[in-house]
Each structure stands twice: as C-alpha cells, then as structure tokens.
Amino acid sequence: MVIKATRVDPITVAVLDSRFDGINDEMARVLMRTSRSTVFAEARDFAVSILDKDARLIAQREYQPVLAGANGIAVEHIAAAHKGNIHEGDIFIHNDSYSGNTHLGDLNIAKPIFYKSELMFWAIVKGHMTDTGNKGVAGSDPTSKTIWQDGVVIPPIKLYERGQLNTGVRDLYLRNLKMPDIVWGDIMCDVGAVTVAERSLLALLERYSPDTVYGAIDSILASSEAEMRKIIRQIPEGVYYGEKSIDHEPIFRDKPIKVKVKITVKGDELTIDFTGSDPPTPGYVNSTWAVTFSACHLIMNYFLPGAIRRNHGSLVPIKIINPAGTWLNPTFPAPVAKATTIPPQAIGEAIILALSKAIPRWITAGAGVMCNYLSSGFNPRTKRSYVDVDFFMAGYPSGGTEGYDGWDLGGPIFQLGALRIPDVEITELAKPAHILQYEQEPDSAGAGKFRSGFGHRYKVQSLVDTYPGAALVGIGMRDYVCASGLFGGKNSKPNTVVIHREKGGTENIDVGAFCDLHPGDVMECHLMGGGGFGDPFERNVERVHEDVKNRLVSVERAREDYGVVIDPVVCVVDLKATEELRKTHKR
Amino acid sequence: MSRYSIGIDVGGTFTDYLLVDEKGTAEIYKVLSTPGDMSRGTMAGLKEMADRKGIPFSDFLSHVALIVHGTTITTNMVLTGTYAKTGFVTVKGFTDYLNERRGMKRTLYTCKESPPRPIVPRYLIQTVEGRIDCEGKEFIPLNEDDIYAACEAFKKEKVEAIAVSLFFSFLNPSHELKVKEILEKEMPGTYVCVSHQVLPQVRIYERASTTVFNACVAPGLRAYVGVLTEKLQKNGFAGTLLLMQSNGGVVSPDVVVDFAVNTLLSGPAGGPKAGLFYAETQNISNIITIDMGGTSFDSCLIRNREPEITVENEVGEYRIAVPSLAIHTIGAGGGSIAEVEAGILKVGPRSAGSAPGPACYGLGGEEPTVSDANCVLGYLNPDYFLGGKMKLYPDRAQKAMQKIAKPLSLDIFEAAFGSYTVVNTNMVQGVRAASITKGFDPRGCMLVVAGGAGPLHACDIAKELEMELLLVPKASSVFCATGMLMSDLRHDYVRVCYSLLKEGHVDINFLNSLLQDMKEEGFATLKKEGIPQDRMTCTFSADLRYEGQFNETEVVLPITDGKLSVEDIPQVQQAFDAKHDALFGYSLPGVTLELICLRAKVEGHTGKPKFKEMAYLGPDASSAIKERRKVFYGKGFITVPVYDGVKIGHGNRIVGPSVIEEPTTTILITPDFQLTCDKLGSYLVYPKGASLEQVSNRLRQD
C-alpha cells in the first residue's frame, strides 16, 4: 500500500488533530493509574508520544517536558537499527544515551503500529525507572566516569518479537537491577499504554482511510510550522549571546561548567548555536544530543506567545547547532546520568539571557534551579527495599515576567510545572522518614516589579540507614548558578543543604556527593527562589502589602527591597513615607 | 386535590421545575434564579404553580408531598468567591500545601499565567505542633498553646468557619479532635469541621482541600436550607424536603449541613438518575447520558443500571475527593466559540456564556459560536427559540461566521458545518473518555440525550461512536429535575484498612466489623430521615491495588450472607484482574493485592412518581408538519420537513432528514436516522433501515 498524502478538508484535519491528543491522554492515564513507583504514579516523570511511520512527531502528552522532545529522536534510532526487521507485534526496549536517548534512567518502550500489514505509526512511552542497575541511587552515581557506571545500557532491542515476550531480554535486564519488581511493573505499564494507543489508532485508520489520516497529519504539521515561523518573524533580527554556568562537575569540582549560546534570528528562522561551550566533563553532568535538543524547544515554547503545538512542524524553523565534543553533546562513553535535570536548566537560562535583549516583553526571569536528594535502603515497616527520588526538592519557583509574578512551584526549566510535588502521607508510607517541614520561605523570592515565586524550607528526618546509598545531586549552591533577575529584578540566593547528625554536629553538603543519613539525622534545605523582573521599587504597593500580610515578605525587606514602609504592629502601609522613600530611590 | 411531587433544579440563570401529580401528569416550569437570596427564586416558582392552578399558595403547598431540591448554590459560592471567611488549621511547618495544589499548572508552555486564587489566604492559615506517624502513633505531642494562638488570630480576623486537617488523622484522630474541642470552646458559633470526619482517607492535600471546601460552603448552605425550610413551613408545607448530592443520591436537610461539600458537584447529578429512569422504560441496562448546555457537555456511563462513582474531582483547580458521580465534563456547548488557532479550527472550551452570548442572540456577541453555526445551518428557527420567547438574528450569526470562514477559505455554510462537526468530535471525545477509557464499549449502550442543545448534535455523535439507539425525552430541557424525583437517599462511607489481601495477613473479623459499622451508621442516618427498615439497602466495595501500586481500583465485594470470608478472596482477586485489564490494557494475575479501604453505599428507597402514558396515534405524523425548510447538512442544502413536537404522539414515525421543534429544544434527525415516539413521549432514534425492535433487543442482551 502506498500512502498518498492527499489534501484533506480543514474540518477532518481539526477532527483528527483532536483525536491524536485524546489518544495521548488515554496512554498517559494508564501510566498514572497503574504504576508501582512514585516516579510515575505521583511525580509523573514520563512523556508519551505518537509518531508517524517516518518518526515525525504528531502529538504528545508530556508530564515531563524535557523527555518529550526526545521521543522522536529515540524512534529514529530504533527504526534505523532494525530497518527491514520491524514486524507487527514487536515492542522495542531502549535506553542508550548514545543512540538517541536522554539518560539511562529514562527507558523507552516503543511499539510500531501496523494496519493491513503496513507500518503506520509508532507509539512510545519514555519514563523514568527507579533503578538503572548501577551502584548509585536511582540511576545517579556521583563517582561515575563512564556511561557503564550510569547503569545497564540497552541498545534498541526487541522486548516482544511478533507478540511474543523475549524472556531472555527481560531476565537479563532485571537480574542487573536492585529493584526488579518495581521496574518490571513500570515496563508493563508502558506496554499497556502503547497497546491502548494501538487500539485507538487502528480504529482511526479504519474509520478514515490511511490516505486521509496522512493528509491530515501533513496539514497539522504544516500549520504548526507556519505558526512558529510567524512568531519568529516578530523577533527583531540579530545575533544574541548568552552564557550560564553550573556549580562544577563531581569528579574535579574545581571550576564552573559553562553553556555558551549564540542565537541568530533571521526572517522566520532562528538558530541556536552552542559552539564554544565547555568540553565534556569527566563526571556525570553531561547532556546528550536528545536532551539539548529537547531543552531548547521547551524553553522557547515556554516564553514565545501563541498556541504553539509541540510537534514535528513547530520544531522545523528552529535550527540547533550542537557540535560534538562539548558537554552538551559529549563523546561516547562520557557519563550522562544527570543529563535531564542539570544541563537543561543552564541551557534554558543562557537562552533567556540571550533573548532578553530582543524580546523583553515576552521573556521571563530565571527559575529556581534544582538540587535534590536520592536515597535507597530498607524499609523495616514494609519489609521491602525502597528507592526514593526526593521530588519535594523538585519544587522551585518560576521567575517574574512582564505582568505576572512567578509561581511558587513548577519553575525548573526541565519540568515547567508538569511535575507533581509529593504528598507527605504517601511519602511517609513509602519511605522510612518523617517529613518535618515543607513550606515557603519568607523573603526568598527574587524581588522585582514582578517578583518570582517563593523558595521553600524543607526538613526531613531519616528513620533508617540509607544503605546502599544516598546522594545529593543537582546545582545551585553558588551565586553564579542562581536564577537571574532581569531589568533591575534581583537574583535569587543559592540553595543550601545541611545535615544535623543525631550523634551531634552539622555538615554542609555540596551537590554531586554521596551523603548517607543515619537514624535520627535531619537534612535541612533552603531551596532557592527565582529571579525578579523589573525594578522592585515600581512594584504595586498593595501587592507588597499583601505579601507582608501573608508573612512572606518581612517589614524590613518591604522597606529595603521594595521601598514600601509598613507599620510592623498593625500591618498598615505608610503611604507618605513610601512615596518619599521611592522618590529618593529614583534620584 | 391531588398530591404533588416537585423536582427543583436551581441553576445559575434559570430554575427548572418538574411538577408531577398522582396521575402522572407532568408540567414544566422555568423561572429566573435570584442570586443573593436564592430561596426567593425557589419560592417564586412554587407560587407560579399555585397561581396557574388558581389555588391559594398555602393550599397548594399543603398538597405537596415531596420536594427534591437540586442546587448549585454551593458551587456558585466557590466560583464567585462568596463563601464564608474560612480559617485553616494544619501541621506546623506545612502552611502552603493547600494553596500550592501540588504544584499543578494549567498550561505548561506559558509564563504569562496566574495561579488560581488561594482558597484560604495565607494569613488565615494557622499551624499547630504535633505529629501522628503513618501507623497512627504520636511522635510529637500536640502543643495546645498553638491552638489557642490560632484561636486568637481567627477571632481577630472574624472567621466564620474553620477547617482542620492534620497528617494521618484517619488513623488516629486524637489531635484533630483536641483541636476541634478547643476551637469550639473558644469560638462558639463558628463552624468547625475536621478532615477525618469529612473524608477519612489517605492523601493530605485531597483530604484537606475537601475539608476546607466543606467549611467554606457549610455556613451558606446551612443559612439557605434554614430560610427555605422556614418559608416552606410557614406557607403550609408539611411534606418531605430532600436535597441532591454529588453522588446522585438525595439527603435530608439536617444531615446535609455537616457534609456540605457533598453538594458541590450536585448540579449535573440528577442527570444519570433521569437517564436510568428512561433506560428502565426500554428495559435496557447500559446507557450513556449526555447533556449539552450553554458552556459545558456532561457525559456519564451507566453500566448494569449503576452509574459510576469517582473520587477524582476538581472544583476551580482544587481537588474534591468525596465520592461523586463520574460525570465527564468538557467545555463544549451552544456558547462555545469557534476560532482558527495556529491554522487549525478549534471550537471551545472558550465560551461566550450568556452575556454577551452567541452573536445570533443579538445581545452584542460578535464571535462565532456553536449556536451561531446551528442558526446559520438552519437547524434553529429564529422565530421559535424557547418556544418563541426569544428572537434570533441569523444575519448576525452569518457575519460572525465570516471570522473563521475567511482564514479557512470556506464559505460561511461550510465554516458553520465545520464548527458543528468539530464540536461534535470534541463531544465524541468526551463520551469516549467516559466509556472507552474505562474499558467499556459505547456500542453496547443506549444514548440518552438531554440539555437544550443536545438533541441537535446527538445523531452525529451516535453515528461516530456507532451507537444504534438514542432516546431524547420530551422533557430533555429539565432532565436534571426529572432525575431528582427519581433519586434515592444515599450515603457513602469509607474506612481505611491497610492490609495485604491474603490469608495470614488480612484480619477478616476486623474487616467485617468495619463493614458492619458503616452499615449501622448508614441505617441510623436513614432512620433519622424517616426511611423504614425494609426500604434500606447496603452494598460494599473495596479499593484495591497490586502490591506496590499507588492508585486503587474499586471492586464490588461479593458478599451474599452479609459477611466476608477468606474463601471470597480468590473471587475478589479475579474481579480485580479483569477490571484492571479492561481499564489499563494489562493485568498481573497472581500478584498479591493490597486492600486500602472498604466502602459502603447505603440507600433508602423512596416512592417515585409515575408518568402518564399517551394514547396510541399510529405511525403517520404528517399532521404535525408545520413547514418545510432548507438546512445545510454535509456538503450542501437539503429541504426537510419541520415537525411541531407538541403534536407528535405515541407511535408516530419520522424519517430523517427532519427537524422537530419542541418548545424548549430542537431535535435534528440526520439523513442516517429515523425515530419513533414511545408511550411516554420520548423519541427513540435509530438508524434508517434498522428495526427498532431488533436494535433494542440487541442492547438488552448486552
């Protein structure tokens, strides 16, 4: 059967467009409802996509945006590796960072979908597994120097061959994991999701012909591309530069690692060029090609206006130059375990800083950047091992932007508010710890005419030894990594993490290190705010007053940062004194 | 004089009434709602009934045996922010989890968006020291000084209601009870509710959010119910007053004020019960009800005569986790706006609402809506909208339609039909979400169609889903009010009981004591509401999951002799595997199940009104034709007969394409369908060439 992409009427296009979204929702629902890991069920660290037979991204549902942009690249590699040997009933498994994936923790399950013996679609789930089979915790080993230390590498291979489970593949993989049951449960979730997608897509092909469906796909992609070109044309032409660093990498720790970006806007095309960024690092903070690609698109979509659809069409007008041999496109076998969280934040900020000069009304100040805690051990209450990615520490605020304050959660550029912050009760049922505090920290927001959201104070007490391991990962312990304020808005302050030992003493912890907890130890974290936007002395007085009334901004900071004088006893604004103070500031 | 039953559905704009007398004669009334004092509007409609019958109001009311009252009063309080000034007490160190809503953001890819307004502003949130662990043991004692400090702050701010939610209170309520005791002692007259009583189940955000909403709306609901009861009694009413709840059951006024949150999603809750009533008339047990109004489209699956219940609900982006009818709502209605977004035609969820409304209303609306499309296509009669009470302006609808026709290079009729098709697709998606994604094939169901706008779109929806039988009630515009009269008293209970579901782990005696406990509580409440013992029923279910999962699936417990036994476990396991496979595409037979909680549904069955049957008129409906009109369908104009619905009776057959105009709704029979009017005046719609009997029989076998 030769598919002719005929021109399809706009109504059928609209109908099919809506159906593709619906099918992705149906897939996502399977993962959320049936997973046995907090990573899927609670934090929703996954993305599902439907691609056409040529691996063009048609539609996706991204609960974890940084994963989503990478699904097309993964399918391209899977299809290429098995060219001529792809059959009805096959289901592929894959996690290799050097064949189109993000880090090894994100496992791909992809199903080619056949209609009348012809390949028509791919459905793919990329989801974060709680274990990758390395010595570290939840896939993170700060001492990792190669991808083999990141975990078990799976090139694109068949988990199911013509509908038959390859038990050898399953057994070999699971035998290398500490948490085989949880991972297998999540793989079965993925298989369920792509099966659900297959059922719906086949019904669609039956109802409309393949010619019509493909004609509609072409129209959808063409519209999205046209829309993206229209938006880019509104950006002043020119060349814009930005750079941003992360703290260090965990092996040598002696210097910041830098992203350098040059953005060229010409007509309706935009080129993002990372030439000149630092070389690959010995430690695991490297990005992968797929992550860098995905990060660029997601940050652009975050601040560009309009209803941009994230599909193959809207990707086309943005060119990415990412030469091999930088930490954003490292050479095999460099370790990449933190690819999805660390590099995207620096990439995003560098792009923001570059384009802030071009599109001040669209751009946003920087979001809080993430450090977080991974731990594993044995839970005597459930009599089971546990692995925990601490997603309380994934909740950082976004920065201010013209007209809007930042949100208190959902800031970090890899997640954009898609990640669900944990429930204290569910967490305490799953891992042996007491969560002692999680609330907003007063005076932590980057001040601005439009301030950022507030950072958080987080305290957790371990009830057991975190054996075989625990690690603090991420970035943000140093001033140069903090969220950037724009146009007079203030930067945020760095993250701090200290451990109060039960046996006495307090230790400061840096990112990229193992740090075990013992029964009774308390980890206390101050998780940063975001960047402010515009001069804080121009902030609406009533909004400053509201923040003071809500005990989020102190009377002192209201005066110093915002020039608003408030009586500390009755909490009333002294308008006259405020006016005076703000006048002095202008002079 | 006859004795009456009245269903009242108080909406934001209109209040609908269905009055049924002993002979089963039904009358429809509609009055404007009166925001501010809703009881005025409610009473006005009752007064109108008495006036129309020409009898004194108190005489009339003294003959009313039953009033079932559905209200969106609590929903509106939340949407408009006019609920009680509410304080919230939670655990020290956790001030913000309520308003942070776990960090969920509506639109991922935008930085220009504000979060929803905090449900309780931060300065009204107080925290107290004291902790219970995940096994119910105290590990930090409760600091009573913090409670007194909270009281002082609340008094200073003059809060009217207080919600309390502490960790794991459903396992050990001692801290919450102490907080409640001190608050009630220190602040008499202030409404206080605690989370383990409102929703005794795990997940702090869901439980707290539900409890806070309960506190927010309880004082307002209590006041409303008080005023209404007083007004009714003063005017001679001595019958029974019942209120609609989100779970599809009704409840007495005394009981509802303690569980005000149970009414928050009660607006559409009468619909499924109405659907069930009509399903019974056809002896069919699987149906899907759809209700298309001005801004939203509701669909609900009823399997084996049992509407599905869910705890995954939202109000204004906050979670409400009390059991509610699983009504799937999307933004599609007569007011949904059609626009070209990034080159592709989209319809809704943006809505023109009732002001300015669709362009064809002539109230200043300029954007093209679904109603405008229906007007341009000729489906709506500009001179007979709402039975002629409202005039439509087709020229304005045509002008509005230009806005999408131009960028799509279509003429206005094609653009209008495109909008019609796209909104139908969205509604099909809604029905799919309510059926297929729950593992149920809509082809085995009858489609019951309600709402003023629903009957214009239903044929295409049914065709797309390959559903072969539709039922459009004559009273489709007061569908919910009908359902209310058909509802039973219902109370839901839940008890948390973690255990692996296998011998040696599960304590069957303990489970049976919980089941018994819920049943007794339910029956005691029903007794208080005046239900005799022989009209009470109780069914049990369990929330289960595979060991290690984080979400549960509810399975009905196969209890025959009133008690669960170890021998029942394999049967429960099989039922769970089957449901899991249907819902999620796979199952894991042999994997141990975890029992999370037990649930009981306790019902008190009330007497239902019976509708009067019509005389048989035979198949010929030609005398009901009032005109022939050109309508646009598919690729061009066709001329169709237009029937006066008032003149159509039992046995009449009508073949599509045709239009039927009822005073409060219009029905479009597309070229693929035909219909027969049954003895209650319902339109049974089925494909051309098929036989009604065969189609119905097929559905009865499913």
Image: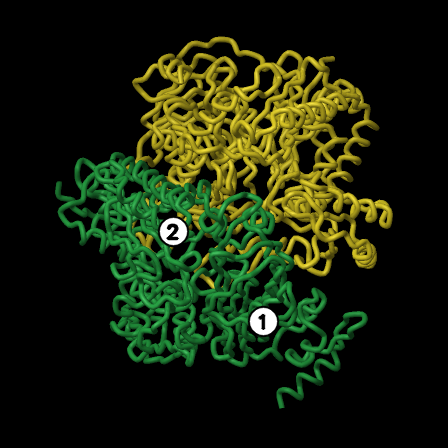
Chain colours: A green, B yellow
Spot occupied by residue B487 in the image (x, y as percentages of width and height): 62, 23
Identify which amino acid the numbered label 1 is placed on.
Glu
Q: In this view of the protein, can residue B650 be seen by the observer?
A: yes
Identify which amino acid the numbered label 2 is placed on.
Gly
Q: Quadrant of residue B229?
A: top right
Residues marked 1 and 2, same chain: yes
Q: Residue furthest front?
A: A503
Is the residue B159 above or below the residue B594 in the image? Answer: below
Q: CA distance from mark 1 to mark 2?
A: 34 Å
Front position in the image: A266 or A399: A399
Spot occupied by residue B651 in the image (x, y as percentages of width and height): 44, 12
Residue placed at 28% from the left, 77% from the top? A275
Q: Quadrant of residue B56?
A: top right
Q: In this view of the protein, can residue A359 be seen by the observer?
A: no
- Circle 2 sits on which residue? A127
- Circle 1 sits on which residue? A507
